[in-house]
Every structure is written in structure tokens, then in C-alpha cells.
Amino acid sequence: MRTVSLVLAAAAALAFSMTAGAAVDADAANKALKDNGCTKCHSIDKTKKGPAFKKVAADMKGKADAEAKLTTFLTTGPKVKMDDGTEEEHKALKDPAVVKNLVQFILAQ
């Protein structure tokens, strides 16, 4: 019985530490968004030339492939057609840690 309790406690500690380590760094995400020019067309809660990140998160909520799709989008730099008819080429991001943090940040909105 004591062994089972120790195993459960260890599993809980591991789960907690993984969650804490995977926390979104909002300051780093906001800096990356600004440094990469994302904020000229996007904002957290207002639609600009591109959709607000809250809208992106809402559209992707509950989709199993949300992280993968957003990661692909951020790393391939596709050209997208905006609501006003213009086309905008996105900058492809290279740093996997920055991309992972941005994906988690956007989906958390």
C-alpha cells in the first residue's frame, strides 16, 4: 500500500513539474511577435489586417491538430490573402523554442 502511495505521489510531482516547465512565457511571446512584425497585422483581441489571436485560438479550440497546424504556419511562412484583398507573406520562424512558445501563447488566448 505504501509503495502505491509513493508511486502516485511521484507521478503527481512529475505531472506538476511538466506543467510548470511548459508554462507560456508571455513576455517572450510578445517580444517575438513584435520582433517578427506580427503585431503590424495582428493583436491579441482586436482584428486588424489579420485576425486577432483570440479569434485564432477560438477557431482552433478543441481541434487535435491545432498545435501542428499553427506550428506549420509559423515555420513555413505562407502567403495569405487578407480580408482587404491584399496578400501578405509571413516570415518563417526558425527557432523551435520560440515557435513552441508562440503556439502555446496564441492557443491560450
Image (cartoon, helix red, strand yellow):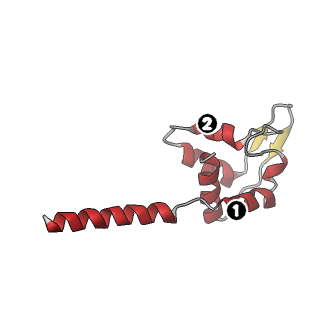
Which residue lies at the image location 24% right of the left edge and 66% below the top edge? 7
Please tell me whether mark 2 or mark 1 is closer to you in this view. Answer: 1
Q: In this rendering, would 81 be left or right of 15?
A: right
| Badge 2 amino acid | Ala
Which quadrant is home to the C terminus? Answer: top right
Tell me, for residue 27, which label it has, or none.
1
Tell me, for residue 8, which label it has, or none.
none
Q: Secondary structure at mark 1?
A: helix
Which quadrant is home to the N terminus? Answer: bottom left
Residues at circles 2 and 1 in contact by the CB criterion of under 8 Å: no
Which residue lies at the image location 60% right of the left edge and 46% below the top edge? 107
Tell which of 101 and 69 is nearer to you: 101
Disc 2 residue crowd, few under 14, some 14–19, many 20+, Cα 10 Å? some
Which residue lies at the image location 26% right of the left edge and 62% below the top edge? 8
- Image quadrant assignment for residue 50: top right
Of the image marks 2 and 1, the number of the one nearer the N terminus: 1
Tell which of 18 and 82 is nearer to you: 18
Which residue lies at the image location 67% right of the left edge and 40% below the top edge? 54
| Badge 1 amino acid | Asp
Q: In this rendering, would 41 be left or right of 13?
A: right
Whole-percent x, y for residue 38 in the image: 78, 51
Per the image, the residue denoted by label 2 is 58
Task: Tell me the CA gap for discs 2 and 1.
Answer: 22 Å
Task: Please tell me whether residue 79 is drawn above or below residue 97 in the rendered image.
Answer: above
Task: Please tell me whether residue 37 is drawn above or below residue 2 in the rendered image.
Answer: above
Whole-percent x, y for residue 69 in the image: 59, 45
